Structure formats: structure tokens, C-alpha cells
């Protein structure tokens, strides 16, 4: 309790020392309902933000376009460990602000160090609703409430095709970036509707998702997602996710024999430039050439026994940038999967052109080299 009291006094003193905020279009104080159904009061525009999941940088890139790291004082910098090329791009574009946040290396299940958070002097902590229970169990929410620090829960993972765009709108309101949020929300929903209209009434091909493909080495198979994450994105694209009926939980491993027996119509793998020593994952992401990505996919499809998988036999194999499962940019994944599942109905949809529009028109990244999706050459 003595430590907690000292931290509370330190936080209060540091917040009182912050410069006065200038007037903004959004009216504060503001009360919103977050994605855990909690009422959250935001007293003034947040200037010092802690991110429980560093992939929310993709959201901030849409909102704080001049500098998506300008508010971030501490975070779980997942990109630095799972996509060093993507993180290098942000570092190159915004070197000063990229060097400023403290990487707390939070656990992906919601573990957070209260002393580190308080030392960062935040006026807002952004977390994902999926870790609510872990934060409650560790008394993090109660502690931050006692310190007067609002916690906002968003969601781009459990119901990504529904809540990702709503999370952009919620953060746009909270961060005084409603105009930017509305622009992206309109873009997202119009393209989502185009997919929905194109695939309406069509059959649902069976899809097996190999998430984190190659992360544990060339011989490992196969980690997948159930009725969350990539599973929900497959459903939004008009497919049936086999992992939903193969798993009893959110995620888990499936034996190759089970995949062969399920006879998937499409085999989808997700990859990124993982730092793991054994990783041979296709390096989807930024500053990469398509040929090397396709080579990585081919190497994994050459694993023993994969020739017996129906989708591999039929040449129906695609790969996607792994971070999209937790990113509000997931409209690219929905479009790409819809084209793979329903090629005749989706001829007018161009996910790569739409991604370029997002990058050049709605972020400060510009026309950077990127490969977020690929099919095996010659298939």
C-alpha cells in the first residue's frame, strides 16, 4: 500500500505539471461506452497514451497522421519483435517520436506492470477487451481507476469485421480525430459492403487457416484460429473456417491428418518477419519483394504430407500478413480472402489498390513497398 500511495502521488504531481491543453473541436469532458460495456470519462484530450497492444499503431496511423507515435509514452511494442521491417519503417519516418515510448513488453494475455505504467504518467490507457479478465484478476483496472487514469477497451480481434471500424470511430472521438476516423470508417464500410453484395447467396468454401505459419520451423504443423481472429475474417469473406469446429478454444494445434481429412477448399497461411531463430515464416509486410514471400510459402507447402491436402492439390493456397488479424486495416484481408474464395463474383474488387489508397490517402506513410497478400506462383 505504501508503494501504491507513492505512485499515486507521483502520478498526480506529474499530471498537474503538464502544460494546459488548448481548445479543440471535441467537447471535453467526454463520456463514452467502450467495447467491454464500461462507461469511461475522458476529462481532456489525451496527450500521454499507454498501449497494451502495440499493433494499435496501425489505428493511430489513421488518426494521428502527422505522427502516429506522438501520444504514445509506453506500450507493448509487438512490431519490434514480430515485424522488425514494419517497425523499421515507422522508425525511419518518425525517428524522434519512435525512440520516445518505453517498451514495457507486456504479456499478450494482458499482463501489465503498474509501476511502469504510473512512471509513464499516462492520461489514457488503451487495452483490448479480450484481456479484461486478466486485468481484473491483477487489479489493474481498480488501481488505475483509483489513480484517476481512464482505461478504454477496444476490439479488433474478437469480432474484427464488426468492431475494428467501430474502434477507429471510438478512438477518433476520444482523441479528437473524428474527421480522420469518419473518413476511414466510410472507406471501410463501403468496401465491406462491396464484398457483402458480391458474395451474397454464394456457397461457403471450407478454409483451413495456418496462423503464424513457419514460426516454429519448417517441420511444424499446424496452429490455427477458431471462432475469433482470422476465423472471423474468413467468415466475413464468405468462407467456412474449419478451425471453428476443429477447436474447443480460441486457438490451438491441429494434426496434419485432420486437415487432410477435412478437405479444405482453400489453405490460408499468415506470416510476418518473426525474429524466432527457427522461424521460416513468409515475410509478409513492408519493404519486402513478392518473390521472396512466394518462396517462403512454397517452402512450407513442400512439407511432407501436404501434397495430400485438397486445397494444395487444387492450387488454392494464399498467404496474408499476420498482423492483419489484429489490425483495423483488416479490410484488406477480407477483400483478399473474398477474391480467393469467390473469384468470379469479386472481379471488380482490388485489395492491393485499396491498400495503396489507405497508405497514401489516410496515413502519413505514403506509397511504401508492401506485400500483404500472395498466392503461390503458377497457381
Image (spheres, rainbow, N blue to C red):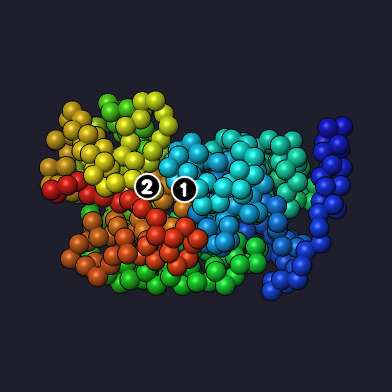
Q: Is residue 243 visible?
A: no
Q: Who is closer to the viewer here, 140 or 21?
A: 21
Q: Are marks 2 and 1 in contact (CB under 8 Å)?
A: yes
Q: Which mark is residue 287?
A: 2
Q: CA distance from mark 2 to mark 1?
A: 8 Å
Q: Is residue 373 visible?
A: yes
Quadrant of residue 2 within the rendered picture: top right
Residue on which disc 1 sits: 89
Query: How far from the left and from the top, in percent, is residue 143?
Result: 76, 42
Left or right, 30 with reference to 222: right
Q: For the point 65% across and 62% down, which residue is it?
A: 175
Density class for disc 2 (Cα within 10 Å; few <14, some 14-19, many ≥20) is: some
Position above or below: 284 against 61: above
Q: For the point 17% across and 30% down, which residue is it?
A: 305
Q: SS at mark 1? A: helix
Quadrant of residue 117 within the rendered picture: top right
Q: Who is closer to the viewer here, 130 or 113?
A: 113
Q: Who is closer to the viewer here, 257 or 245?
A: 257
Query: How far from the left and from the top, in percent, is residue 123?
Result: 73, 53
Q: Which mark is residue 145?
A: none
Q: Who is closer to the viewer here, 356 or 202?
A: 356
Q: For the point 28% across and 28% down, which residue is it?
A: 218
Query: How far from the left and from the top, in percent, is residue 313?
Result: 12, 42
Amino acid at each position: 500500500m505504501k508503494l501504491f500511495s507513492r505512485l499515486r502521488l507521483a502520478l498526480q504531481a506529474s499530471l498537474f505539471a503538464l502544460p494546459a491543453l488548448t481548445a479543440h473541436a471535441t467537447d471535453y469532458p467526454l463520456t463514452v461506452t467502450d467495447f467491454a460495456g464500461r462507461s469511461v470519462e475522458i476529462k481532456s484530450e489525451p496527450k500521454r497514451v499507454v498501449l497494451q497492444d502495440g499493433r494499435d499503431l496501425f489505428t493511430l496511423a489513421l488518426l494521428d497522421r502527422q505522427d502516429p507515435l506522438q501520444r504514445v509514452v509506453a506500450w507493448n511494442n509487438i512490431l519490434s519483435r514480430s515485424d522488425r521491417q514494419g517497425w523499421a519503417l515507422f522508425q525511419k519516418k518518425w525517428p524522434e517520436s519512435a525512440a520516445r515510448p518505453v517498451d514495457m513488453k507486456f504479456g499478450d494475455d494482458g499482463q501489465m506492470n503498474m509501476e511502469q505504467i504510473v512512471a509513464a504518467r499516462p492520461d489514457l490507457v488503451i487495452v483490448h477487451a479480450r484481456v479484461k479478465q486478466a486485468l481484473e484478476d491483477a487489479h489493474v483496472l481498480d488501481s488505475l481507476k483509483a489513480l484517476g487514469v481512464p482505461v478504454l477497451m477496444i476490439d479488433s480481434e474478437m469480432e474484427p469485421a464488426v468492431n475494428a471500424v467501430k474502434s477507429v470511430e471510438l478512438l477518433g472521438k476520444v482523441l479528437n480525430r473524428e474527421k480522420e476516423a469518419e473518413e476511414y470508417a466510410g472507406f471501410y464500410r463501403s468496401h465491406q459492403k462491396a464484398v457483402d453484395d458480391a458474395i451474397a447467396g454464394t456457397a461457403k468454401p471450407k478454409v483451413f487457416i495456418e496462423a503464424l505459419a513457419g514460426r516454429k520451423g519448417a517441420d511444424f504443423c499446424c496452429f490455427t484460429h477458431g471462432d475469433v481472429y482470422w476465423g472471423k475474417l474468413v467468415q466475413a469473406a464468405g468462407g467456412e473456417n474449419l478451425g471453428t469446429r476443429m477447436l474447443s478454444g480460441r486457438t490451438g494445434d491441429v494434426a496434419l491428418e485432420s486437415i487432410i481429412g477435412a478437405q479444405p477448399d482453400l489453405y490460408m497461411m499468415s506470416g510476418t518477419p518473426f525474429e524466432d531463430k527457427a522461424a521460416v515464416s513468409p515475410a509478409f509486410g513492408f519493404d519486402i519483394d513478392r518473390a521472396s514471400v512466394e518462396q517462403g510459402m512454397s517452402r512450407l507447402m513442400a512439407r511432407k504430407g501436404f501434397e495430400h491436402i485438397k486445397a494444395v492439390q487444387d492450387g488454392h493456397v494464399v498467404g496474408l500478413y499476420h498482423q492483419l488479424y489484429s489490425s483495423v486495416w483488416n479490410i484488406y484481408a477480407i477483400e483478399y480472402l473474398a477474391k480467393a474464395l469467390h473469384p468470379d463474383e469479386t472481379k471488380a474488387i482490388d485489395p492491393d489498390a485499396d491498400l495503396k489508397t489507405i497508405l497514401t490517402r489516410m496515413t502519413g506513410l505514403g506509397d511504401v513497398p508492401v506485400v500483404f497478400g500472395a498466392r503461390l506462383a503458377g497457381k
